Image: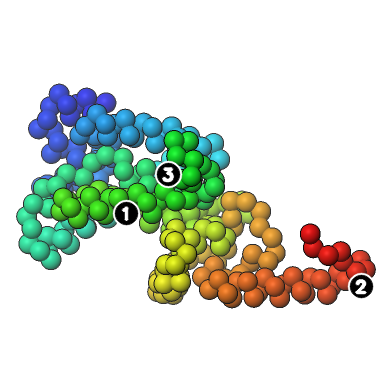
């Protein structure tokens, strides 16, 4: 509907898109709620519909409508506020007045959040039009494409929306999403932030993530769960190095074998 309004009345872009100069200078704060529904082009609207159908419908089935709507609201708020602050920071650093009038609009931040959610729910799901590409590869790939476009065009709207949609959704799903029995978040190794990156970059990302958790540890809930049942051996620190995780897993398996050995007799050789 807002696309039709924008097409019929182009000057309404000021009142529907999130434009930093108007949001801060003129007090158009309602655009923090309308920007993600307003699409400047028909292909942007088609992009939003496809992503809602492919990625949103699955997350809604798993979580339920209330949790799904809350997740979308968090992604919208983080994308809007984060993009606004990014534009203001770029202006303060480079005195580039153009960034104050760049319209932030569209569904890109929410789309990145839905892709991140699908990485958690079905990471190995193949993309139908490119079977070699799996859902777990999409977040970093799309953020990299947005970064390249922003550098080439010196327009940071796409990158800021993608980045904040990605990060806000991961933080919520990792540490804050409520589950049954008072548990929160997803503590599995597979949803560690470093697993978004290629294996060669994971150690460096792991160190940065450990520092981030240390700085904001008072925000992190002490209870966490995962979207699927986890074995006992996976209950280790989510930020341990891969070698530590393997070592602890081996020690846990050895202790379990020692405990069950006398009662069950010699265990068969592994197949």
Q: Is residue 25 above or below residue 213?
A: above
Q: Earlier in the sequence, mark 3 or mark 2?
A: 3
Residue hosting label 2: 262
Where does the N terminus fall, quadrant-wise? top left
Q: Nearer the viewer, mark 1 or mark 3?
A: 1
* Nearer to us in this view, 60 or 183: 60
* Nearer to us in this view, 224 or 236: 236
Q: Are marks 1 and 3 in contact (CB under 8 Å)?
A: no
Q: Spatial distance from mark 3 to mark 2, Cα to Cα?
A: 49 Å
- Neighbours of disc 2 within 10 Å: few (<14), some (14-19), many (20+): few
Confirm whether residue 217 shows in the render: no
Q: Is residue 4 above or below residue 220?
A: above
* Nearer to us in this view, 12 or 271: 271
- Neighbours of disc 3 within 10 Å: few (<14), some (14-19), many (20+): many
Q: Nearer the viewer, mark 2 or mark 1?
A: 1
* Nearer to us in this view, 158 or 11: 158
Residue 174 badge = none
**Residue 99, position as x, y percentages in the image:** 12, 53
Dot 1: what SS? Answer: helix
Residue 114 badge = 3
In the picture, measured across the screen, residue 2 lies left or right of residue 72, that is left
In the picture, measured across the screen, residue 21 lies left or right of residue 4, that is left
Q: Spatial distance from mark 1 to mark 3, Cα to Cα?
A: 17 Å
Write down the quadrant of residue 111 in the picture: top left
Q: Is residue 17 above or below residue 146?
A: above
Residue hosting label 1: 144
Residue in the image at 31% along x and 43% along y: 108
Q: Spatial distance from mark 2 to mark 1, Cα to Cα?
A: 54 Å
């Amino acid at each position: 509907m807002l696309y039709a309004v924008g097409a019929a009345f182009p000057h309404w872009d000021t009142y529907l898109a999130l434009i930093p100069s108007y949001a801060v200078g003129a007090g158009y704060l309602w655009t923090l709620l309308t920007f993600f529904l307003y699409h400047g082009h028909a292909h942007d609207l088609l992009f939003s519909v496809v992503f809602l159908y492919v990625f949103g419908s699955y997350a809604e089935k798993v979580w339920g409508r209330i949790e799904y709507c809350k997740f979308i609201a968090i992604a919208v708020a983080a994308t809007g506020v984060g993009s606004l602050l990014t534009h203001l920071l770029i202006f303060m650093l480079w005195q580039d007045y153009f960034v104050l009038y760049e319209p932030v609009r569209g569904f890109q931040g929410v789309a990145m959040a839905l892709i991140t959610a699908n990485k958690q729910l079905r990471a190995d799901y193949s993309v139908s039009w490119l079977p070699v590409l799996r859902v777990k590869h999409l977040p970093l790939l799309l953020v990299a494409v947005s970064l390249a476009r922003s550098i080439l065009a010196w327009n940071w709207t796409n990158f800021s929306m993608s980045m904040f949609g990605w990060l806000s959704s991961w933080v919520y799903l990792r540490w804050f999403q409520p589950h049954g029995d008072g548990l929160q978040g997803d503590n599995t190794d597979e949803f560690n932030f470093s697993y978004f990156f290629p294996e060669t970059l994971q150690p460096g990302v792991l160190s940065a993530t450990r520092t981030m958790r240390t700085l904001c540890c008072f925000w992190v809930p002490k209870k966490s769960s995962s979207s699927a049942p986890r074995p006992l051996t996976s209950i280790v620190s989510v930020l341990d190095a891969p070698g530590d995780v393997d070592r602890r897993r081996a020690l846990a398996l050895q202790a379990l074998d020692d405990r069950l050995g006398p009662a069950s007799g010699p265990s068969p050789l592994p197949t």
